[in-house]
Amino acid sequence: MDSTADTPADGAVDPFTQGRVTAAVLIIGDEILSGRTRDTNLGDIAKYLGAHGVELAEARTVSDDLGEIVAALNALRARYNYVITTGGIGPTHDDITADAVAAAFGVALYEHPDILAMMTARWGGEINAARRRMARVPVGGELVNNPVQGPPGFMIGNVFVLAGVPQIMRGMLQDVGPRLKGGAVVVSRTLRVEGSGEGAIAAPLEGLAKAHPALSLGSYPFYGPEGFGSNLVIRGRDPAEVEATLAELIDVLAHAGISQVQVVETPA
């Protein structure tokens, strides 16, 4: 099922026409900003989106403040094809993501009958007020399946609202993928350079980057008891250009006197 992300907000540039499909992640929660909880969802989301041809272009973290969430969400959903939010959909008073999303879209919240039925089947009897909070969905929203535990998330427009608990979030992601309209998947290759610092690598790498503006070339230094060096990563949507640039990189480094290089597997 396609979302309405095909039609960005008025005035926004449509990345679909530029060969890129982009997304942003909005991480919601005071516990993240305070350092009490370490976010592990961002990396999982980035890898998942990348495999579907969607480039994660921005991530923001905001507190449990309705106005801050609404402002961030409206800015992101106008700029990118998709937005994924994590956190703030539980039963407590500070779980206000549903309220904020409804406010951002200018619609009301209602208790979704399917979620109430799930809760009744699980807990039986009368559902208390705290649990009923988790049944609220903005008018026009669609449910995102939760195969792990608890109520589902939801999507509205180009926004997917997911749980903050990592295991549950990963389960919900499996229902996000089929709804994405992705572009070309980005491929990457990594060249490990040992015994040379970034100062020696910088000039050859910069020249190559200028010659291939469609690619992303990055240098990531490493240090340890076994030595030092950099992992040079080439990323792009054209596999042939990525491979050709990798060979060219090895050649320009050799001409600069850098020969301790090895092509290594790029982490997924």
Image (cartoon, rainbow, N blue to C red):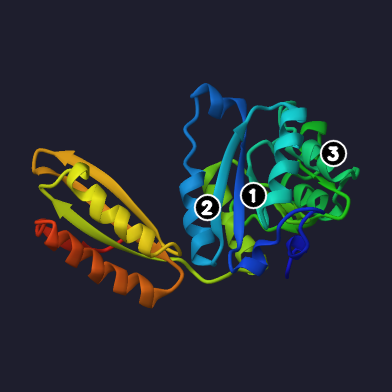
Residue 128 is left or right of residue 240, and the answer is right
Q: Which residue is mark 3?
A: 103
Q: Is residue 17 above or below residue 49?
A: below
Q: Position of residue 84 (x, y in %)?
A: 64, 49
Disc 3 marks a residue whose amino acid type is Ala
The residue at the far top in this view is: 34
Q: Position of residue 251 (x, y in %)?
A: 18, 67
Q: Earlier in the sequence, mark 3 or mark 1?
A: 1
Q: Is residue 50 above or below residue 118?
A: below
Q: Quadrant of the C terminus?
A: bottom left
Q: Is residue 245 above or below residue 125?
A: below
User: Regarding mark 3 in the picture, which secondary structure is present there?
Assistant: helix
Graded by Cα atoms within 10 Å as few (under 14), some (14 to 19) or many (20 or more), the crowding at tag 3 reads: some
Residue 167 is left or right of residue 216, and the answer is right
Residue drawn at point x = 68 percent, y = 36 percent: 88
Q: Which residue is mark 2?
A: 45
Kindly indicate whether the residue at mark 2 contacts the one at mark 3 (C-beta within 8 angstroms): no
